[in-house]
Image (spheres, grey):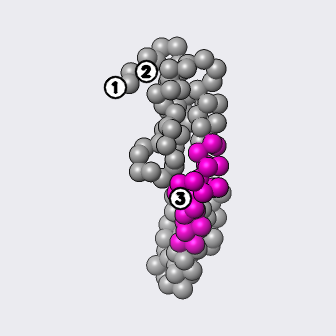
Amino acid sequence: MVDPKGANPPEHRKHYYIEDEKRRFREDPEFFLKYRKGLETKITKSFPLFLRGSPLNIYAKKAMRERMLNLIGTGHEELKEKLIPTWSPGCRRLTVSWVGRRQTESHVLIFVHFLAG
């Protein structure tokens, strides 16, 4: 949800800044610093996600696999084998489960033929 006055932009998800927010960042350096530090804190808290074998890493890997299984649906075993990663999140390889939902779901449409090379 966008704050129409730009007073409190969200710190934890994709956000398209409106002109009022940009203006406030330019005109209120103290607010901008507090906002940036809040972003940094939230990003730093997710660091354990990338430590292979950590509880959060194991949970994320399992959750990402389950999400992919749900998106692909029943059947399509070869597609699951090709698309669902076996590596942990954060290993610098692309992880398909980060791909948009519609893109993943499109692989199982009747008129789509998935080619892996």
Classify 30 as above or below 46.
Answer: below
Q: Residue at x 63, y 70 (%)?
A: 8
Residue 117 marker: 1
Residue at the spot of label 2: 114
In magenta segment, residue 117: no
The secondary structure type at the circle numbered 1 is loop
Q: Residue at x 50, y 23 (%)?
A: 79
Callout in the foreground (3, 1): 3
Residue 75 seen from this side: yes
**Residue 51, image x and y in percent?**
53, 58
Which residue extends farthest bottom? 30
| Label 2 environment density (alpha carbons within 10 Å; few <14, some 14–19, many ≥20) | few
Which residue extends farthest left? 117
Tell me whether the residue at label 3 lies in contact with that at label 1, contact meaning CB atoms closer than 8 angstroms: no
The secondary structure type at the circle numbered 3 is loop
Tell me whether the residue at label 3 lies in contact with that at label 2, contact meaning CB atoms closer than 8 angstroms: no
| Label 3 environment density (alpha carbons within 10 Å; few <14, some 14–19, many ≥20) | some
Left or right: 54 with respect to 94? right
**What's the residue type where badge 2 is placed?**
Phe
**What's the residue type where badge 1 is placed?**
Gly
Classify 101 as above or below 50.
Answer: above
Residue 20 seen from this side: no
- Classify residue 44 by image quadrant: bottom right
Q: Residue at x 56, y 36 (%)?
A: 101
Residue at the spot of label 3: 51
Q: Which residues are magenta?
A: 39-63
Classify 79 as above or below 40.
Answer: above
Q: Residue at x 63, y 55 (%)?
A: 56
**Residue 66, image x and y in percent?**
64, 36
Q: How many marks?
A: 3
